Image: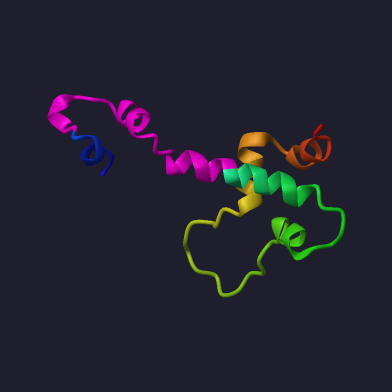
Amino acid sequence: MERKMIGVTLRDRKRAEWVREQTGVKDIIVEIKKKKWTWAGHVTRQQDNRWSLRVTDWIPREGKHVRVRQKIRWADEIKKFAGITWQQKAQDRVD
């Protein structure tokens, strides 16, 4: 769609980054990741016992066992990239 906006085809051999630069359209994956990190820091810095803070560490109770891949929780994905102390780092943020 972005290529169509500026009249470039695949035969022109222009990279996707170049096309995105020309159109000014933001990469949705990058934007989603930024929003996720922003939200994680915001939730972690909350002082009271809000539901958004509680569900960050929530572990769903086990029901009937089915052989499937283990579900990755939202906080697990953040721990993978930021380390185990990501919540402390968010608390120590300097504005």
Which residue is more in the foreground, 21 or 89?
21
Depicted 11 relative to depicted 28: above or below: above
Total label count? 0
Horizontally, residue 50 falls left or right of residue 24, namely: right
Q: Say which residue appears at 61% left-offset and 52% top-offset.
A: 74
The percent position of residue 86, horizontal first and vertical second, equals 73, 39
The answer to whether residue 27 is magenta is yes
The figure's colour scheme reads rainbow
Above or below, 72 relative to 78: below
Residue farthest toward the bottom in the current orientation of the protein? 64
Percent across and percent down for residue 11 are: 12, 28
Residue 42, image x, y percentages: 73, 48
The reply to whether the magenta stretch includes residue 29 is: yes
Residue in the image at 55% along x and 57% along y: 71
- Residue 73's quadrant in the figure? bottom right
Q: Quadrant of residue 48?
A: bottom right
Q: Is residue 33 left or right of residue 11?
A: right
What predominant SS class does the magenta segment belong to? helix
- In depth, the one of 48 and 55 nearer the eye is 48
Farthest residue toward the right? 47
Query: Residue 64: which quarter of the image?
Result: bottom right
> Which quadrant of the figure contains the N terminus?
top left
Residue at 48% across / 56% down in the picture?
69
Question: Could you tell me which quadrant the C terminus lies in?
Answer: top right
The vertical placement of 92 against 12, above or below, is below
Magenta span of residues: 8-34
Image location of residue 10, percent across then percent down: 16, 32
Answer with left or right where residue 31 lies relative to residue 12: right
